[in-house]
Image (spheres, rainbow, N blue to C red):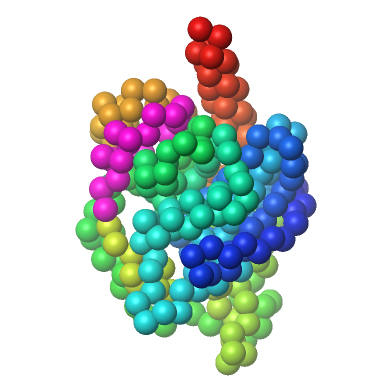
Amino acid sequence: MKPAPYTDRTVEVNGLKLHVQDYGTAGKTPMLCIHGSAANGHWYDFVANGLTDEYHVLSPDLRGHGDSEWDRSDSPRYTYDDYAADIHALTEKLDLRDFILAGHSMGGLVSTVYASTYPGRCKAFIMIDSSLNMSPDRIATMNAVGSREGNSYADQNEFVGRFKIRPAGSSATPDIVGHLARHAGRQFDDGRWRNKADRNVYALRIGRNLIPCWGNIKIPALLMKGDRSQRVTPEIIAQVRALAPQVEVMEVAGCDHHVTLDNPPGFVEVAKKFLNRSEEHTSELQSH
């Protein structure tokens, strides 16, 4: 798939200007796609073309990510609750109702908090390969990575040439990796090129078991996982289903963690299959 065209939008929420990619098509059911940690909305560029025939697809950059503003306060706030509050404010500013929410990796965790805390607007939820209960060791590693100086490069060409998708294991094509690289970095005040993400998003990362949140999620929901990924374990699936029996689980073939990059057509196929089924189920309930 080719990267989808989009319109840049800027929406101010909770004192920060957030960048939003609007892929179109207005008038159709909105679909809000949330990226993972240290990523940005471009993680959805290669699946949006397969979705805009049925949905109005939007992908914001979370605070401290992509082309959205950093929290430059004395105590920067980058918790799941802060991100979820931003999403809530964004849906109100854009007047999104009966929308579909999709979140990858940390975006799936943030979306879980949103769906459990702000019910009423979102009508279906796709969580994409998210670790709902990360170990303290993994959180500590993230904190350590964010607390040290990151790599910097002399120019954009060097940044793009050295860019790697993290975590490793992705089978994304070189074209996809290059496309992401060109949107991942910017030139800072010292003239050096670095990743756009605020390193505090890792340095201040706080772990939290989000499985209990699923007790408050009543809408149709899908746990989507890459067939090679180990993040959504059978134990987690069982715990989630005990709290939210409506949850479905589907795999996308040929994928590790970065499902939207490793197999874009497979992601679109699985997402649409779930969404079409949830629409049919909703229609049946309404007819009764």
Q: Quadrant of residue 191?
A: bottom right
- Magenta residues span 208-233
Q: Residue furthest top?
A: 288
Image location of residue 242, percent across then percent down? 26, 26
Query: Which residue is at 37% across, 41% downward?
Result: 116
Q: Residue at x 67, y 78 (%)?
A: 156
Q: Residue furthest bottom?
A: 190
Which quarter of the figure has residue 262? top right
Q: Is residue 118 above or below residue 82?
A: above
Tally of numbered discs: 0
Residue at 53 percent across and 63 percent down: it is 13
Residue 133 x %, y %: 28, 47
Q: Which x, y percent locates residue 139?
A: 28, 61
Q: Who is closer to the viewer here, 11 or 52?
A: 11
The N terminus sits in image quarter: top right
Outermost residue toward the left in this view: 136
- 22 vs 177, nearest the viewer: 22
